[in-house]
Every structure is written in C-alpha cells, then in structure tokens.
Amino acid sequence: MGEDDTAAALRASGRGLSDAWADSVGVRPRTTERHIAVHKRLVLAFAVSIVALLAVTMLAVLLSLRFDECGASAAAPGTDGGPGGYPERGGGTGNGSLPGSARRNQHRAGGDSSQQETGGVATPGTPSAQSPSEEDLEPWQPWTQLRLSGHLKPLHYNLMLTAFMENFTFSGEVNVEIACRNATRYVVLHASRVAVERVQVAEDRASGAVPVAGFFLYPQTQVLVVVLNRTLDAQRNYNLKIIYNALIENELLGFFRSSYVLHGERRFLGITQFSPTHARKAFPCFDEPIYKATFKISIKHQATYLSLSNMPVETSVFEEDGWVTDHFSQTPLMSTYYLAWAICNFTYKETTTKSGVVVRLYARPDAIRRGSGDYALHITKRLIEFYEDYFKVPYSLPKLDLLAVPKHPYAAMENWGLSIFVEQRILLDPSVSSISYLLDVTMVIVHEICHQWFGDLVTPVWWEDVWLKEGFAHYFEFVGTDYLYPGWNMEKQRFLTDVLHEVMLLDGLASSHPVSQEVLQATDIDRVFDWIAYKKGAALIRMLANFMGHSVFQRGLQDYLTIHKYGNAARNDLWNTLSEALKRHGKYVNIQEVMDQWTLQMGYPVITILGNTTTENRIIITQQHFIYDISAKSKALQVRNNSYLWQIPLTIVVGNRSHVSSEAIIWVSNKSEHHRITSLDKGSWLLGNINQTGYFRVNYDLRNWRLLIDQLIRNHEVLSVSNRAGLIDDAFSLARAGYLPQNIPLEIIRYLSEEKDFLPWHAASRALYPLDKLLDRMENYNVFNEYILKQVATTYTKLGWPKNNFNGSLVQASYQHEELRREVIMLACSFGNKHCHQQASTLISDWISSNRNRIPLNVRDIVYCTGVSLLDEDVWEFIWMKFHSTTAVSEKKILLEALTCSDDRNLLNRLLNLSLNSEVVLDQDAIDVIIHVARNPHGRDLAWKFFRDKWKILNTRYGEALFMNSKLISGVTEFLNTEGELKELKNFMKSYDGVAAASFTRAVETVEANVHWKMLYQDELFQWLGKAMRH
C-alpha cells in the first residue's frame, strides 16, 4: 500500500532520519575497496572490456530478433511503473528501484549479484524482466484471486538479509524450495513494498533451468507474479530465487525501525511485526498461515549491533570492514506471520528452565542494569515449565528471547522463540510499579508464552478461526496467573470483570459478528482481530471447560496439541478431539453441535426465568438474542432475519436467607421451556448461571429480583463472590437495554457498604462508569453523583488510604485487600468525595514542595489525575516535566494519562496537538492520550473535533495496525450522547465511506443507543434518584 503526502510528511517528522536525508547518506565503503592496487585495476579494466565485447555481441543478436511490442510499461496488470514493481511513494520515480543509497548497497546481499547464475533469470537490465506481453498471459489470472491458488507449496526458505542502519534500507536474497502440486506457468507469492531486482527459477536438479518471461507486482492482492516460458510440472520441486531491496520503515509494521536515547545519544534498532499479513513487506513469501515451511536466516549487519531471530545463532562470520554475518539455525515447520528478527545494540540477562530452554530478556542497557527485566525473566522460566506440564508437550525450540522495544503496535507479539514486547508491558521497576501494573505485565507475558503452543506450534488453518489461538491465550492469562499467584483467583473471579463483562458490552450490539467469521480478503483479516476473537473466544473456552469438567478438558487439549503439532488446525479439529476426550469418560456430547451455535452465530442470549404463579416448583425459561438497543435490531437485516437459538448450559440454585441448594444443570435449547424445580417455594429465590461460567445473561421476574436484593442486604455472603459480581453486572446491563426498571441495579449496590471483597466492587465500578459518562454533562448530574458517594462513603472511611509502598514479597498477601482499597479510593475521588480530594491534593503538593514522591504506588495514578484536575496549571507543568524526565516506563505511562485529567481546555488542546509528535509521545501512546481526553467531560468535544480534523493523519499512521483504528474510533465516540453529536458522526462517516467501516458502524450504533437511552430512561432514573435521596 502506497503512502500519500501526509504519510510521507509524518514519516519525515518521526524520530528516524527522513527518507530524503537517508537517500543522501552513503554507506561507508569497505577498506579493501578504498585501497585497490593499480595492477588490480588493470585486471578489472580488462574484465570490463571482455564484458563489453560480450554485451555488443548479445545486442547484435537481440536486434536480429523480432520482438512483440508490449506498449507502455504500465500495460500489464498490476505494474507499479517498473519491472520490479516497487510501489510509488510521494513523488517517487516509479522505476522499480529503491533510493540511490540502497541500490548502491544491493550487492552486499548474498554476494555479488552480477555473478553468473544457473536457471532462468529475469532482472531489470534484460528484456525478460519487463512486464510480460499479453501473449504470455493466459485468461486465468491467479494473481487476481484473494487467496493463493495452492498450486505451489513452499518447503524451505533460505533468507539472506543485509541491513544498513545508517540509512534505514536493507537488501535481501530469498531462495524458496517449492513443491508444485498442480502444473502452472505462474509463480504467485506475496510481496509488498519491496523492489524486486532479479528473479530466477530452476528445478531442484542443477541442470533444470526454467526461463522467466517476466515478473510484476500486483498491489491489489499484494502479490509478486513470475510468468514462466514453460509450465512447471506437477509433483516436482523447484527453486525460486529473488533478489530485492526495501526500506526499514518508520512505521509500525513489516521490518521497521525504532529508537531510544542513551546518555544523550539517540540509538536505533530494527524490528519486525509480521502478523497477520506483513511478512510480505520484508521478503517475498507465501504469506498465509497454512503454508508452513522451514526457514534458514542469515543477517549481515555492522558489528556494533547484534542480531536476533527465532532460532539461536549457529555461526557468526566477521569481516575486516566492521561487518558481521549471523547465520541462524534452521527453524521447525512454521508460518510466516510469527517469523521474526531484530537488529539492535541491547544487552540481556538469561536463565534456563528445568528442561534446558535458555530464556533471555533483551532491553536497553540502562533497563537491564536497573533490573527492570528481572521479574519478566523469572516468571517466563516458571511459565514455560507450567505449560510443559499442563499440555504434556515440551517447548519446541532451544531458546526463547524476550525483546523489550520502545515502539510497537501491540502490547506484544508471540514470535516463536523471539517474542517482542512494548516496554510498558514487560519492564517493571519494583520501586515505582503498582500491583495493577505488575498484574498487567504478568498477564501479557502469560498470554504470549501460551502462544508458543497455541498459535506457533499449532496454527489456525485460516484467519476466520484466529480465536483458536487468541481465545486460548486470553483464557490462559488467568489460568497461568493463578499458577503464579494461587491466592488471586483470577480464572474464577477477575475473569468476570476483565473479560466476560467487557466483551458482552461489545457483543450486545446488532453490529457485532460471530467469533468465527468468513475472511475473504486482507481487509477482512484485520477486522477479525478484535475483542470478539480474544475475549469472547476466551469466555466460550471457559464455558466449555466448566461444562466438560476441567480435567477432561485439559486431557482433550493435550491430545489436540499432540495430534496437530507443527501443523494447522481448524475449529472442527478441536471439537472432535474434545468430543473424543468426553467419550473416553463415558459422556456422549457432540461438542461441535453445541459450540457451532456459539461460534457461528453473533451475540449471546438472555435467559429469562419466570416463576409460575399458579403452580409451585414450576418455572418458565425463555431465551432470546440480547441486544442493547432494540431499534438497532430492527434496522440490522442480519439480526432481523435470523431467529437465533443456542444450546445453553444453565446452572441453577435455589436459596433463602440462610441456605442454598446444590447446583443443578438444565440444557435449554428452545425459545420457551417449562421445568420443575424442587424446593422452590414463595419465600425462596432462584439464581441462574452460577458463578457466571456461561456466556449469557439471566433475567428474572421482579419478585425474584426483590428477593435477591433482600438477600444481599441481609446476608450477602450466602451468595458467592462471583455470583454477587454477576448479579451487579447483569442488572446494570439489563436495565440499560430496557429489560429491567432503572432503579433495580441502583438498589442492588446499596448492599456494598457491607461488601468486603474486591470483585463485586470492581463489577459495580465498571458498570457505573458508562452510566456516569452518559450523565456527566447533565444539569441534574449531582443527584446521581451524591447517590454513588453515599454508597461509597462507609467503605472509604473504613479502609482509609495505604500507608506504605508494597514490595514484591507482599504482593501475594496484599493483592485482594489493596485492590479493594484502590477501587474504593478511585470511586471516591472520581465522584468528588471531599476527603479524597483533600488527601490527593496534599500528597501531590508534598511531592512538588519536597521533590520526593511519597505517594503510595498503588494509588499514584488516582492521585496524579485528581491533583491535575483540582489544582492549577503549575501542577500540570510539573507532571509534564516529570513525564519527560522519568526513565521508568510504568511511571511514564500514568504521568501521561494524568495530563488528560485537566479541567483546562487550553491544556487539553495543547496535549492533543503534542500527541502527534513522535519525539514527545510514542506512536502507540498517542491513541491513549486522545481517548483519555475524550473520557474527560471537559475534553470530550475537543477530542471528537481533534479526531475529525486529524483523521487522515491518524488513519495513515494506524490504519493497517490491528486494533489501533478500532480502539481509537471506539474510544473517541463511545460516550457521545446528543442528537447533534450523532448527526456529526453520521456526516463524518459519509466523508470517509469504506475506511474502517465496521468500526464506524459500531460507533454509530453505540451513540444511537446512548441517545435512545437518554430519551427513554433518563427521566425515570432521575425521578427514582430524587425519591431515594429524600428518604
């Protein structure tokens, strides 16, 4: 994909050298080249004269031949203005070449490219490299297809790279051994943004040259097409050789550059991000996950750098001129998207697992020296050992490197043997890191290590089942963290608030999509990487594990990984393996039949349980598709025309003030069913979806809701912690969608003054947040504000503020209590508790006056934000200064977010404009700045205007990066709630029709739901609040 002028300007303003500057920088010539002896020059001159004589002879022969004119060079389909097909960029010449300096350096890759080759060769210097004539092209054009044809299969890649870090270019030579499955005249493989200089095809036997008629890039499908003069024979192997060069990009995908400052000097590094479809930007390849092959990589670089890849270095060859070539061991069979390499001057620490896997953490030298990577290194060793034991499949490579980089589009990427993390998600300085930050770092690492099995060892056949790797990795974030910290109860508790409740908000939209969805083209691939794949995938896996039984589920996973290791698998492979595991334990459940309804249908059901007023012990259970905004359901054809049904594992208990029955399970598969429940009388309540293990909501008749509220107020501990949290979330969501009166959820949280556990408070806080954002610009907002403060006051006073900072040894014991205290302080300060505001102001004033930060670690972000919002501009400037001076990445993150809390619109505008300067705010952090300003009621309209004004720049920067555009669009628009803002959003969408269409469609539905809720339920809510506050 080419870049427009804005993107070029953006690249030039980044932290790296601009392209224009890079072009003028020559590579240091080799010492031997500078001191060639005179007699060698004579020999060279003689050789040149011989070559010239041969050239004249060839020209005479060529002129005697009759050539068919191809017309203009652009006549062939997909050409980019030249034989190499290098995409044009901002005023490029379109001659299929790189900037001059890269062309000068191209001979370094794989030796002298002028050397005599065997086989059919096409280069820019020969007629055969021109775009093939129409006679050479057949009516069937495989390069126009959205998927590779499957006629050819890669078996092995030899990839040789030479990286020029002083001008950010690289040259490459890739030799691919390919198996021909079906006879074909075309070799079609993926390539994008590379300048192809030369192509050669040969049989695997030395004598078997295959003449090349020509080659061209076809940007519509991002492929390189090699047209041959004869057909490749089926059931034979061939060798494809391509010499090319490209830029080390100043963006976030493919092979790109990043930088950091050490001792006042800016240092650069080159890293890769290939998932899902960006390996083709670094080398021509069969860039689909089904095409697994082995890889042998060699990287030539200046000796001041080191290079890393998926496998260990086998040999290193040093040259006299300060260059070194690292040859890496051959990989096992793997897909292109998790191939990786890096060129940097980092240092490392290492450890070794019980099974002999060498684990290293590479980072900036100052971070390694401070010990910022020690925690990640320690838990990675333990996690490899945990997964090897849990899956009963050994880790497959001899080493695992963790690389902490300043700039990366995602939290981390699970490249096999070389996992790359953005610094904020792996480096941890115990002296300035909170428990929340430690948890965040832990879970990202647990997720990526799980991918070494789910994703790398066993890979989805195609992107429609990306949840097979992402859902499992997300689910095991909680299982793996429970292994590291058994007392935290992550899978049973925190999973609810951080995964289930969050994704059900998204999946309750009519614009949602199934967890497995059809993927036809590249734009569809980006769309499937969203929270539906990650979080809904994880929630469905958790539901499956609970109704199968965890031990049977675990054995099923062991079988799945063993059967499919080093290969690809689809969802039916998983269902079949799990069904077999159940069968061995005497249970006959067709997992595919059950789970297809959950994975191939969008959304989820709401179960409604109604007591039969005429007959005791009888209930009516109904299911229907849950949608937040009923009017959206009538508009969405996909939803309106489908009568969704699920097979639902509904667990039920019956209870009263002192006793709860044992759990029973009812499989609900019809729209409406009658069931008999023993021991259900008029004084008993009924609770469904015990501990929220199922992916659905549960509603009751008002009588049952009243009984449950009464139970919570009288003795809430009769219900488990997870059940209490689940009731709170269901009630708020059901009221938001109009299934319940608005007062029911607000009545439920009255019991919180007696709640001593973190999870229900966390569920309430998360449920109140979107409601708060709907109301925070209303005139009578204070009534809602005062009601929440009233519920928080008792627990806030009881818990108080933390007195001391906590070191790592106290984390295990203090987690639940300290997270509860933090949650309550956050609610108190957010809703304006006077003592909370005073305490925050005192702490931040003390820091400013003494220049000693004594603010407890676990509440620093709350104090910083509260201080910035309450105090004057000097505090904002102080935080801004600290943001620039600190080197601790965890501290940097919360300081930057605190700046968005200001009530001063001028400061918010200033920050928004600074966010696009990569020298000031890292690219991946700019999105968070814009979103946090949008969450501030004083900045919501500013962020919305900034987003529209800067959309072209933002879309150019983040448009190809998974999550980033959708995260930005959602974050800026999710709390718009007026008719005027809805109209602005719709008009803006029309201006950029087709760009990020799915994200904008979701945004419109969300804002419409906000507007409709205010119109239908706002008055009802405030009337009830008014009465409640008077009593």
Image (tube, rainbow, N blue to C red):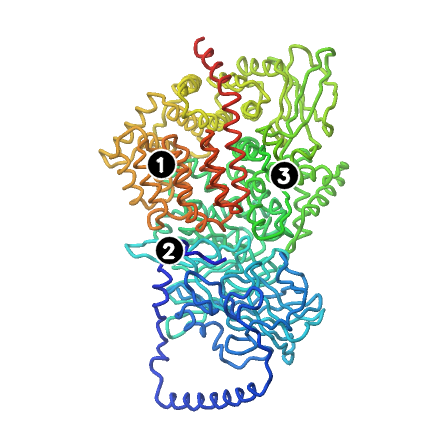
| Of labels 1 and 3, the one closer to you | 1
Asked if one can make out residue 315 in the rendered structure from this viewpoint, the answer is: no
Crowding around mark 2 (Cα neighbors within 10 Å: few <14, some 14 to 19, many 20+) is: some
Q: Mark 3 and mark 1 in contact (Cβ < 8 Å)?
A: no
Q: Inspect the image, locate mark 1, and give the three-letter code of the amino acid beneath it.
A: Thr
Sequence-first disc among 3 and 2: 2
Instruction: Give residue 101's quadrant in the image.
Output: bottom left
Sequence-first disc among 1 and 3: 3
Mark 2 secondary-structure assignment: helix
519 or 901: nearer the viewer: 519
Q: Mark 2 and mark 3 in contact (Cβ < 8 Å)?
A: no
- What residue sits right under mark 1 in the picture? 900
- What residue sits right under mark 2 in the picture? 9
Q: Is residue 941 left or right of residue 467?
A: left
What's the residue at 54%, 12% (across, down)?
714
Crowding around mark 3 (Cα neighbors within 10 Å: few <14, some 14 to 19, many 20+) is: many
- Expressed as whole percent of the image width and height from the top left, the position of residue 300 reads 45, 68
Crowding around mark 1 (Cα neighbors within 10 Å: few <14, some 14 to 19, many 20+) is: many
Residue 815, above or below 18:
above
